[in-house]
Structure formats: C-alpha cells, structure tokens
Image (cartoon, rainbow, N blue to C red):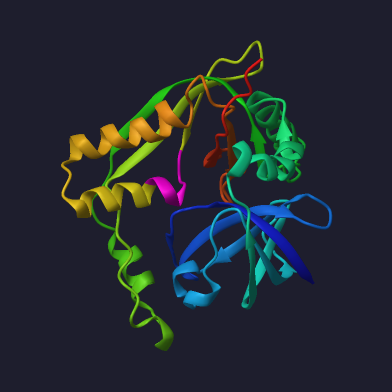
C-alpha cells in the first residue's frame, strides 16, 4: 500500500545482523492521522535524492511487517518520493496540527497499558506514543564503549556494491538518559534512554570541530535540557518500545515549541 507520512522521528543507526545497520523512522500518516513506524530503514544507503528530513512529507510503498509492534510497516525504500517540509514558522503552528492529536495523558498511562497487555499475553496497544513531561529533572550521561563489538563490525562490513562508498558508522561513546516525571499525580519518576539521531549527530559535529569531552557534554545538556525542556517550552516527548523489549520505551525525539503565554 502507498502511504503519505510526515516524518517525526529518526533514530541513530544501529548495527544489525540482518540489515547491516538499521534506523527506526516514525511519523504520522496523512490519511488517518495515526502513528506509523517504518522499519527497518537503511537510511545511509539511500540515494541523496531520497534522504528525507524531520517534518518532511514523504510518500512510500509499505507492506505489513512481521514485527508484532503496532503501527509497524516494512518500507520499500526504492519507492520513496520526497514532499514538502513543514517549517517551524509561527511557533511550529502547522507542525502542532499533526502532533497534538497524538499526545497521550502521561508516560505512566502508556507504561501501565503496555504492562497490562504483556500480562495478558498480547502485543502492546501502543508501540509509539507522545506525551508532555511534567518536570524534566536532568540528563544522565554514561560512558559507553568507544567501538562496536566484533560481531557488530562484521554485520556492518557486509556491504553491497552500492554501499562501498559509505563511511563507516561512528560509535558514540556515551549513553544519554532523560530523568523526568510525567503528568500522572502518582508518577514515581522515569529514566529513559535518548536515541534521537540529532543528539548523536550533535556529539559527532562538536567532536569533529575539536571540542573536548566536557565541552561536548555541556553543549548537549544546554540544547537537550535547558533549551528543549525549559520552562518556556511546551515540551512533548516522542517514545517508542523495542522489538525485543516491548515494555521498555525510549525517547525517540523531542517536540519543543514555545509555551503559549497567558
């Protein structure tokens, strides 16, 4: 089937034994205004004229995936057609028209629903979701390995003819986590990993520019905590669960227009 999709999130590439490397891409469909996950997406293997941006419309043929997570379709990447990009003009007003209907009450409600589904032996109802955090307490930064494992390097080395000029995927030697409370009055607090491509790309850009590790971490916190989650922002987190960890949700992206002043 053919789908027209507004891209909302794109995660950093991850080594894959089946796909060499894969990216989770998700957005909202034009026809029914529902979530859709396009997975796997070998984004770095796309021709330049097919490489889409966040908040850009694309049209693409998809087939229902064997992945049991709701909203998940396998993209036929050769069929991608790029459309217009929605700008952040007028405080993201046009983007809000598509994001606002997706916003749920709280992460606690999303998690409770996932737990209930798993206890009943069925797939979770929501594998993608959006919600407003009530208070973002901070970003945890943990040191990670500086290189891929031997298996991961072998997976990524199995490149086809059209991948031979692709640069090796750089390993970011840190893991990043949001600590926050959601809108549920009884929220005990959440800690979720951030896997947005934009954060990892910011790290890489600053490193290649010559910033030291302390400067890089400080600038990431400034962008992803102070700016995106500041009191002047109407912050929304986009989250999704893992194929092998359906009860565990990660932050896939952040929506952060300015808060309307009363």
**Going by the image, does 182 lie left or right of 42?**
right
Would you say residue 247 is visible in this rendering? no
Q: In the image as oriented, which residue stretches furthest toward the top?
A: 185
Residue farthest right in this picture: 32
Assess whether residue 152 is covered by the magenta stretch.
no
Q: Residue at x 74, y 42 (%)?
A: 97
Q: Is residue 6 visible?
A: yes
Q: Magenta part of the protein: which range?
A: 194-199
Residue 80 as seen in the image, left or right of residue 63: left
Measured as percent of width and height from the top left, residue 49 is found at 52, 76
Q: Is 243 drawn above or below residue 138 in the view shown?
A: below
* Above-or-below relation of 153 to 201: below
Q: Please state the horizontal and vertical placement of residue 233, each as a whole percent of the image.
A: 54, 26
Q: Which quadrant would the C terminus be assigned to in this image?
A: top right
Residue in front for this viewpoint, 96 or 201: 96
In the image, residue 260 sits, relative to residue 245, either above or below, namely above
Give x and y (percent) for residue 5: 70, 60
Q: x, y percentage for residue 223?
A: 38, 35
Which one is nearer the viewer's eye here, 27 or 180? 27
At 30% across and 55% down in the image, what residue appears?
Answer: 171
Name above or below for residue 130 compared with residue 71: above
Image point (29%, 52%), residue name: 204
């Amino acid at each position: 089937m053919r789908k027209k999709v507004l891209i909302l999130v794109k995660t950093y590439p991850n080594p894959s034994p089946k796909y060499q490397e894969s990216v989770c891409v998700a957005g909202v469909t034009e026809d029914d205004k529902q979530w859709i996950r396009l997975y796997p997406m070998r984004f770095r293997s796309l021709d330049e004229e097919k490489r889409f941006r966040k908040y850009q419309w694309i049209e693409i043929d998809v087939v229902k995936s064997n992945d049991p997570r709701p909203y998940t379709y396998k993209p036929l990447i050769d069929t991608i057609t790029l459309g217009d990009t929605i700008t952040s003009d007028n405080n993201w007003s046009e983007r809000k028209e598509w994001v606002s209907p997706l916003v749920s009450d709280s992460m606690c409600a999303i998690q409770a629903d996932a737990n209930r589904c798993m206890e009943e032996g069925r797939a979770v109802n929501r594998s993608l979701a959006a919600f407003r955090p009530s208070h973002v307490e901070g970003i945890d930064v943990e040191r990670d390995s500086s290189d891929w494992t031997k298996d991961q390097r072998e997976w990524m080395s199995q490149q086809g003819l059209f991948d031979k000029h692709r640069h090796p995927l750089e390993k970011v030697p840190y893991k990043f986590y949001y600590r926050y409370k959601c809108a549920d009055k009884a929220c005990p607090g959440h800690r979720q990993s951030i896997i947005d491509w934009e954060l990892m790309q910011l790290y890489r850009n600053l490193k290649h520019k010559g910033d030291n590790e302390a400067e890089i971490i400080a600038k990431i916190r400034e962008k992803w905590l102070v700016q995106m989650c500041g009191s002047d922002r109407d912050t929304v987190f986009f989250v999704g669960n893992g194929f092998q960890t359906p009860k565990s949700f990660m932050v896939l992206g952040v929506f952060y227009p300015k808060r309307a002043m009363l």
